[in-house]
Image (cartoon, rainbow, N blue to C red):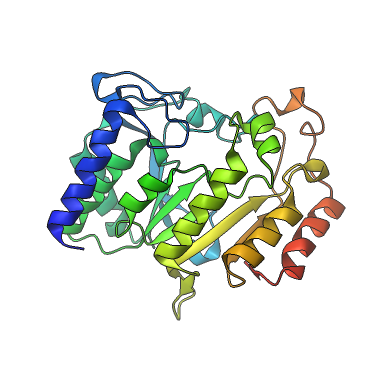
Amino acid sequence: MSQAERRARIESLRSIMKSCTLCPRCCRVDRLSGEKGLCGAAGEVVINSAGPHFGEERELVGAGGSGTIFFVNCNLQCLFCQNWTISRGVERKDSLSCEELAELMISLQSLGCSNINLVSPTPYLYHITNAIDLAAGAGLTLPVVYNCGGYEAIASLRLLEGFIDIYMPDAKYGSDQAGKKFSGVEDYYSRFKEAIIEMQRQVGDLVTGHNGLASRGLLVRHLVLPQDLAGSREVARFLSEELSAGCAVNVMAQYYPAYRAAEFPPLDRQITRAEYREARSAFQEAGLRLL
């Protein structure tokens, strides 16, 4: 992609913020004038923290950790969000300019991080692509990871092509009904399927080097919920039959009741070993690449 095309895509993402449709919520608020969408984001990029993170998948961590940037605000409203003080904007720091965000990426590289890991990036696509472009001009060579909730707009993802090396979406649910009940959106699974097909088109299956670190591709996370509320078998079927049998998946067992989960049994308890084994078996039987 030429530099002119990169700049054109960056400016397109900025223009979208005038009547924001960066994500499928399509709030159409003028964020450039300071209006806030349902995600809580206005015109400035706000982060909570940044630094080497050693709790991610081993394909991302390496010796220096994953260079993680936690963005404030989120386009989902999950009742069990384990980072709810960040996603709901309770914890925040001062906003950054695109230039400062680029400098932050370069500093993470200088610390020896294995990648730039953008957590909950969806509201800030203009700022992020602009910062990546500026950082690349200043010597950034690390893979960029798009670590999102899986509720993405196709038009926005297409504008990200060439900026993102590794897509890492959550596969939260295997039905729209679950997304409506637990994350406050009517069409989570329908949008997730469209989005992940676009991600796969752009970067393909996960590629790792001789050191085991990912350099490009798609890595899907699936958090197992109590009583199979996440619809694990349906998610596994879709990934295997409609996406790619070589899709890399992390089936996660670390659910615990957080935020408002206690109000919505059975979300008020951790999963059992049997529930996790059953969910993982669904992905194994589908022939997917489990991390």
View extreme (right): residue = 274
- Nearest the eye: 96 or 177: 177
Tell me if residue 114 comes above or below residue 37 in the rendering.
below
Residue 67 visible in rendering: yes
View extreme (bottom): residue = 210
* Label total for image: 0
Q: Position of residue 176 (x, y in %)?
A: 66, 39
Task: Quarter of the image for the N terminus: give it.
Answer: bottom left
Q: Position of residue 157 (x, y in %)?
A: 38, 50
Residue at left offset 46%, top offset 73%: 207
Residue 44 visible in rendering: no
Tell me if residue 230 comes above or below residue 62 in the rendering.
above
Q: Quadrant of residue 226?
A: top right
| Left or right, residue 262 beside residue 95 | right
Residue at left offset 57%, top offset 64%: 243
| Left or right, residue 14 beside residue 250 | left
| Left or right, residue 158 beside residue 268 | left
Task: Quarter of the image for the C terminus: give it.
Answer: bottom right
Residue at left offset 72%, top offset 54%: 234
| Left or right, residue 107 beside residue 286 | left
Residue at left offset 23%, top offset 34%: 15
- Nearest the eye: 239 or 82: 239
- Nearest the eye: 260 or 186: 186
Q: Position of residue 216 (x, y in %)?
A: 41, 67
View extreme (left): residue = 4
Q: Position of residue 186 (x, y in %)?
A: 60, 32
Q: Quadrant of residue 261?
A: top right
